[in-house]
């Protein structure tokens, strides 16, 4: 079977967030898909099956299946548009965990349309402060992630978490964020409980980040930078109860899996 490795949310290889994409004619067992994801050892491996006019999609980290993954969806759309003969400038995906998701293409720019996260303010705990080795200003809890607000971009960039302690927090991942110096906001994403200490660029985290910063900055169109070592640049827009998350992608690898 085919496999692609795509760097998402970047215009250059060796940056952005790498995702594996596996086109399927029919679904494999969860056990096999999880083993493939573990063997790939990337933040996410996406699998898809074409069903009529839609493409069913699922995402796996090296250890678990997840509800939603932005960069691997962007990577999958890039594969369909550029290598798998998809006709048109729009793709409709369906996830049994997250519903209908669309990706549109304008030139080389790909835009995800995802539902916004629902989140609420919560009290800070010593567990969080000790795990992050810094005291955030505010704390929020979404459907699967926690989000913590920092004073500035430098605090986000210089944070050095204790990943063992961070893995004890019951959540898919931990988002840290602040107002950016050259972009509207910056972020980082930690997910040791999901099999990755730090994710390079996390599209799904922006379903929480975009509605928060749109309200704080009183604007619906925003620019974002994820401050991982590989860096990721995103163009964002709040669309009532959905968000548009846009970026570029580059193909790093095309191969064949022998199962």
Image (cartoon, rainbow, N blue to C red):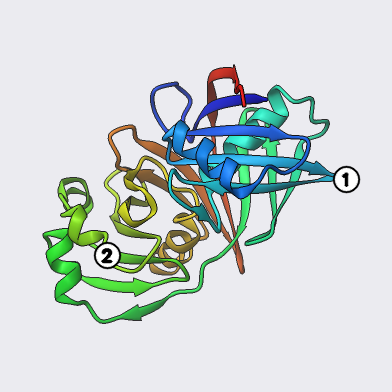
Whether residue 29 is visible: yes
For label 2, the crowd category at 10 Å Cα-Cα, with few meaning under 14, some 14 to 19 and many 20 or more, is some
Q: Position of residue 30 (x, y in %)?
A: 61, 49
Q: Quadrant of residue 109?
A: top right
* Disc 1, SS: loop
Which numbered dot is residue 149? 2
Q: Does residue 17 appear in this view? A: no
Residue drawn at (19%, 77%), measured in percent from left and top?
125
In the drawing, does residue 258 fall left or right of residue 62? right
- Write down the quadrant of residue 55 in the picture: top right
N-terminal of the pair, mark 2 or mark 1, is: 1
Q: Secondary structure at mark 2?
A: strand
Which residue is located at x 40 percent, y 61 percent? 172
- Residue 113 is situated, as x and y percent measured from the top left of the image, at 64, 53
Query: Which residue: 79% across, 25% down?
Result: 85
Q: Using residue 173 as the reference point, say whether residue 243 is left or right of it.
A: right
Q: Which residue is mark 1?
A: 52
Q: Is residue 107 above or below residue 256?
A: below
Q: Residue at x 47, y 59 (%)?
A: 210
Give the position of the C terminus as an image quadrant. Answer: top right
């Amino acid at each position: 079977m085919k496999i692609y490795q795509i760097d998402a949310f970047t215009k250059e290889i060796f940056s952005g967030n790498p995702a594996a994409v596996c086109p399927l004619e029919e679904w494999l067992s969860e056990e096999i898909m999880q083993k493939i994801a573990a063997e790939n050892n990337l933040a996410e491996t996406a699998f898809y099956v074409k069903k009529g006019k839609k493409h069913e999609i699922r995402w796996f980290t090296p250890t678990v299946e997840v509800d939603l993954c932005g960069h691997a969806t962007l990577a999958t759309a890039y594969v369909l548009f550029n290598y798998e003969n998809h006709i048109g400038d729009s793709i409709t995906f369906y996830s049994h965990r997250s519903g209908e998701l669309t990706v549109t293409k304008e030139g080389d720019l790909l835009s995800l349309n995802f539902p916004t996260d629902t989140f609420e303010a919560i009290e800070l705990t010593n567990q969080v402060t000790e795990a992050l080795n810094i005291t955030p200003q505010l704390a929020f809890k979404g459907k699967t992630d926690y989000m913590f607000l920092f004073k500035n971009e430098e605090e986000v960039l210089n944070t050095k978490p204790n990943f063992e302690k961070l893995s004890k927090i019951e959540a898919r991942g931990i988002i840290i964020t602040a107002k950016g110096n050259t972009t509207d906001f910056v972020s980082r994403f930690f997910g040791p409980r999901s099999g990755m200490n730090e994710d390079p660029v996390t599209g799904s985290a922006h379903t929480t980040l975009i509605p928060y910063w749109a309200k704080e900055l009183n604007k619906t169109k925003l620019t974002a930078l994820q401050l991982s070592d590989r860096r990721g640049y995103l163009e964002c827009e709040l669309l009532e109860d959905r968000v548009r998350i846009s970026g570029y992608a580059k193909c790093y690898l095309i191969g064949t899996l022998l199962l």
